[in-house]
Amino acid sequence: MALNITALKTRALTAIVFVLIMAAGLLINHWSFFLLFTIIHFGCWREYQQLVVKIDPEYAGISAFHRYGSMIAGWCLMLYFTNDAFAFGALSLHSIGWWLGLLFAFLLPISEILFANNISLKNIGRSALGILYISLSCGLLIDMMSFPAPKDAYMVPARPALPLLIIACMWINDTMAYLVGSLIGRTPFSSISPKKTWEGTIGGIVLCVAVVAIVSRYVPVLKDIATIHCLMIALIASVAGTSGDLLESKIKRMAGVKDSGNIMPGHGGFLDRFDSLLIAAPFVWVYVEIFLRG
């Protein structure tokens, strides 16, 4: 197959811009981190709802209040997971998320009764799954920014060590799995994603853990996390991230599309870029709560 120089340039330029935006959002301060994941949150939600409509056209009939109210209710969950470092004077995002979330929890069922042509528990359930799939994961990433502060400490500086580690594991695992799979991959891993192989999948996980084992000793932002915990997080993130990639591939196959969106030319949409992270974040959070904060 001939090399498409134009497509390669487009992909490379998009990747550079993507990395710069991600780096700025992750590293400037806690507000840039929150803004970055707010954009990711709503971008993923938009694509999720479009995919659900392609899977089941009945979902297109939900009211505008249901459509946007679900997104905002999920965003309120993100706000709830912030601490008092995210505040405007005496008004914290945590409090806004709590009270605004309660309001939407009250209004959304009423809106279904008043504005929906027929009350569909199936549509309500799909929106609820979106909150668990997208909003909860983004919220847990924000919650992990407060590590290594104890559970009862609220006013803490931005310490993005854990989110950075998880995101780095996603990129390392994907890259290593692609390289190993390209070189020695022979055994198909899943019919959901025909290009994945067992060799590439296992190689990506093993090499991700190996890379983290080496770099965790020298990266200052990881100094508060013991090496054994870095390795366990790398293992959990790699395995769960692979599952997240397969889940999104399954959803796209059901919807009959190649990419979840086209926000990033040559790379697809928000869900294409963050599918692994959305599934890895809750599993890593559980590990952190049990073994690092417990």
Image (spheres, rainbow, N blue to C red):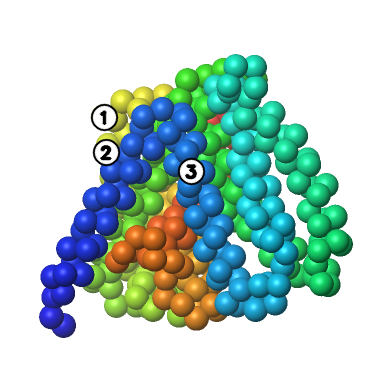
Residue 284 seen by the camera: no
Q: Disc 1 to disc 2, how far (Cα)?
A: 8 Å
Q: Which residue is mark 1?
A: 218
In this view of the protein, which residue sits in the foreground, 116 or 242? 116
Q: Amino acid at mark 1?
A: Tyr
Which residue is pictured at 66% across the width and 41% down the height? 76
Q: Amino acid at mark 2?
A: Ile
Neighbour tally class for label 2: few under 14, some 14-19, many 20 plus, Cα within 10 Å: few
Q: Disc 2 to disc 3, how far (Cα)?
A: 28 Å
Q: Which residue is mark 2?
A: 214
User: What element does badge 2 sit on?
Assistant: helix
Residue 162 spot, x, y in % from top left: 44, 35
In this view of the protein, which residue sits in the foreground, 58 or 204? 58
Neighbour tally class for label 3: few under 14, some 14-19, many 20 plus, Cα within 10 Å: many
How many marks on residues?
3
User: What element does badge 3 sit on?
Assistant: helix
- Compared to 21, does 218 lie above or below? above
Q: Amino acid at mark 3?
A: Phe
Which residue is pictured at 32% across the width and 39% down the height? 23
Q: Which residue is mark 3?
A: 37
